[in-house]
Image (cartoon, helix red, strand yellow):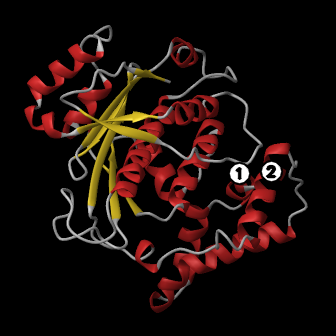
Amino acid sequence: MAWYIQRRYPRSKLQSYLATQLPQQLAHRLGNLVSRQQALLIWKSKAKVVSTAAIRSSLSRIREYIVSTSHPWSAHIGFVIPRVHHIHSLGDASLLGVGGYSPTLQFWFDIRWSAATLAKLQLPSTDPSFLHINALEFIAIIVQLAAITTRLRSIPSSGPSPFFPDGRPHLPIVLVETDNTSALSWAETATSSSSHGQALLDIYSELLRLQLFGINAKHIKGEDNVLADYLSRPTNASLSFPSRRAQLLARHPSMTTWDYFHLSAEMQQLLISRLSSVQPVEALQLPATLGQFVPTASTTSSLLTL
């Protein structure tokens, strides 16, 4: 339907036309007028929208959210109005893997793509199983939010902590930076025309519905996203985890006191399933445990793959 409206009623052209018809003092009403015309087009249209199993499942889940008393259809005002962030996090993805870190909460992660994921990346774009780099960039954001959720759950709601000397903010705001404009758009609007994007947005939305934090998303130039880029593009993909850790700490010694975030097996499996080419129709349940933190200096973890 969104495609139909855009084709029949291109917003930019309509806006340009109305701008020439309205007096200057009414220019602020332009957006509302365009939205009204598009709404009228929807209700008067005789176009048919095919109801797939995925659409019916989504509508059913939205209804459940609205009528649920345990999960009210609401949000804290502190997560809605623009506010300065309390937590900073950055991530990146490449054709080798995905990485991210938070200087505020002092954690990092890096994950390698499995042979199955790499094979999907090499398929022609017309293949239903083709996997676009945009989906992998969005996984970087999801893993960051999983790590932030895990960290915040471990911090007492009152009193000082190593991350918040003045006490944990009551309604913390997270600033996530990405150098991928599609992943940025998905994070800002919680919508995507990509089937993989829609499947991953299920996870993203459920993390936000925990209401542990609000999120701001911002674009960062690729050349400025140095550490996240390094985490996602190892110089030697065959290095063992201890060797990779030693290489990383030699380059960024301040990370010695940070923690490595290790996704739980359940969260790994959830992300892998959402990278399938079939749009899921079942209601999503986040794992009780999203992951765990291990001190960087002592961990002997093996590299994760998705």
The one of 122 and 164 positioned closer to us in this rendering:
164
* Residue at 29% in and 44% down: 90
Q: In the displayed structure, would residue 277 be above or below residue 170?
A: above
Using the numbered discs, state the Cα–Cα distance from disc 1 to disc 2 in whole angstroms.
21 Å
For label 1, the residue is: 3
Question: Looking at the picture, how far across and down is residue 32, in whole percent?
Answer: 59, 80
Q: Is residue 131 left or right of residue 45?
A: left
Q: Please identify the quarter of the rendering in which residue 278 is found.
A: top right
The one of 65 and 263 positioned closer to us in this rendering:
263
Neighbor class of circle 1 (other Cα within 10 Å; few <14, some 14-19, many 20+) is: few
Q: Earlier in the sequence, mark 1 or mark 2?
A: 1
Amino acid marked by disc 1: Trp
Which secondary structure lies at badge 1?
helix
Question: Looking at the picture, how far across and down is residue 218, in whole percent?
Answer: 33, 54
Q: Is residue 239 left or right of residue 30?
A: left
Q: Is residue 247 left or right of residue 91?
A: left
Answer whether residue 237 is visible to the viewer in this image: yes
Q: Residue 57 carries which label?
A: 2
The one of 231 and 265 positioned closer to us in this rendering:
265
Which secondary structure lies at badge 2?
helix
* Residue at 57% in and 47% down: 203
